[in-house]
């Protein structure tokens, strides 16, 4: 101990703190789906749904189903829209991966019917339909919301949602101008539940979910 002076001890301490700090930073910077709370799970072409993902569903009046945890706020959002004279309708919600596969097969067949080779048809279909395992609809947290067809127009519904959905924890998931990050064209009807805190920040900063999760 005689040869170890205070400076050496401080140096060793600093190195140790640095190593621990690096380990902590590495684990915090990781945005893999498995580490995120359920409402912030990221699903896109590069981040498929975790294997064995489980969801408890609630059925809506028109037969669509959603994750039961988002139902109360969805109901509040629709009540609020209706009291403002806007009449939305959930046209698509939870989809099983089999249903997603069926959508993909149908799209491929359309291109084959248009005269494309099977290989070319498969490539073209990928631009229109998310591959099974990579659609947010398979989480039960995504909704396609349109007008009910008679009392409001689609554009009135999209306009109201764009201004108000964040108050209920929903975000416009594929906003215009973010196509290069989300990989999906602007979809004014597709909303995703992330919870009110994240939705408010995403709305105010006009960012997309990928940017929010990567801390940009
Ligand atoms: Zn959708």
Image: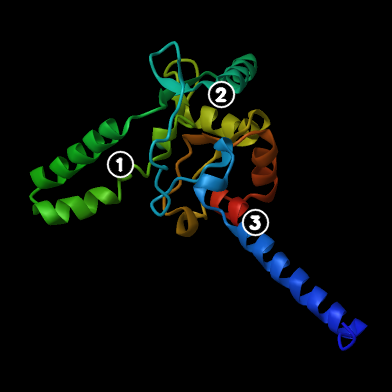
Neighbour tally class for label 1: few under 14, some 14-19, many 20 plus, Cα within 10 Å: many
Quadrant where the C terminus is found in the figure: bottom right
Mark pair 2, 1: CA separation: 23 Å
Left or right: residue 198 compared with residue 2: left
Q: Distance between the residues labelled 3 and 1?
A: 29 Å
Classify mark 1 as within 8 Å of ligand 1 or not, answering yes or no: no
Whichever of callouts 3 and 1 sits on the residue coming sooner in the sequence is 3
Determine whether 22 is above or below 206 in the image.
Answer: below
Disc 1: which residue: 132
Q: Name the residue under label 3.
A: 28
In the image, which is nearer the foreground, mark 3 or mark 2? 3
For label 3, the SS is helix
Give the residue furthest to the bottom: 3
Q: Where is residue 147 in the image (x, y as percent from the top left)?
A: 46, 23
Residue behind mark 2: 69
Asked whether, in this view, residue 200 is left or right of residue 170, the answer is right
Marks 3 & 2, CB-CB < 8 Å contact: no
Q: Quadrant of the N terminus?
A: bottom right
Front residue of 6/141: it is: 6
Q: Which of 144 and 160 is in front in this view?
A: 144
Q: Residue 141: image x %, image y %?
A: 49, 32
Q: Does residue 215 appear in the picture of this structure?
A: no
Ligand 1 quadrant?
top left
Query: Badge 2: how crowded within 10 Å, few (<14), some, or many (20+)?
Result: some
Q: Distance between the residues labelled 3 and 2?
A: 26 Å
Picture coordinates of residue 71, whole percent (x, y): 55, 20
Mark in front: 3 vs 1: 3
């Amino acid at each position: 101990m005689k040869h170890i002076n205070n400076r050496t001890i401080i140096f060793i301490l600093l190195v140790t703190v640095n190593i621990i700090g690096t380990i902590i930073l590495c684990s915090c910077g990781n945005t893999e789906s498995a580490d995120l709370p359920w409402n912030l799970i990221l699903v896109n072409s590069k981040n498929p749904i975790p294997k064995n993902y489980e969801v408890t569903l609630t059925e809506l009046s028109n037969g669509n189903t959603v994750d039961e945890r988002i139902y109360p706020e969805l109901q509040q959002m629709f009540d609020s829209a209706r009291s403002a004279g806007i009449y939305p309708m959930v046209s698509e919600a939870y989809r099983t991966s089999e249903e997603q596969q069926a959508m993909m097969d149908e799209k491929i067949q359309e291109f084959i019917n248009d005269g494309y080779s099977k290989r070319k048809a498969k490539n073209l279909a990928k631009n229109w339909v998310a591959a099974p395992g990579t659609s947010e609809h398979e989480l039960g947290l995504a909704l396609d919301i349109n007008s009910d067809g008679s009392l409001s127009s689609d554009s009135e519904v999209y306009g109201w949602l764009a201004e108000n959905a964040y108050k209920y924890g929903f975000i416009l998931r594929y906003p215009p101008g973010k196509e290069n990050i989300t990989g999906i064209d602007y979809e004014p009807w597709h909303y995703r539940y992330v919870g009110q805190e994240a939705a408010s920040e995403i709305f105010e900063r006009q960012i997309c979910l990928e940017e929010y999760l990567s801390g940009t």
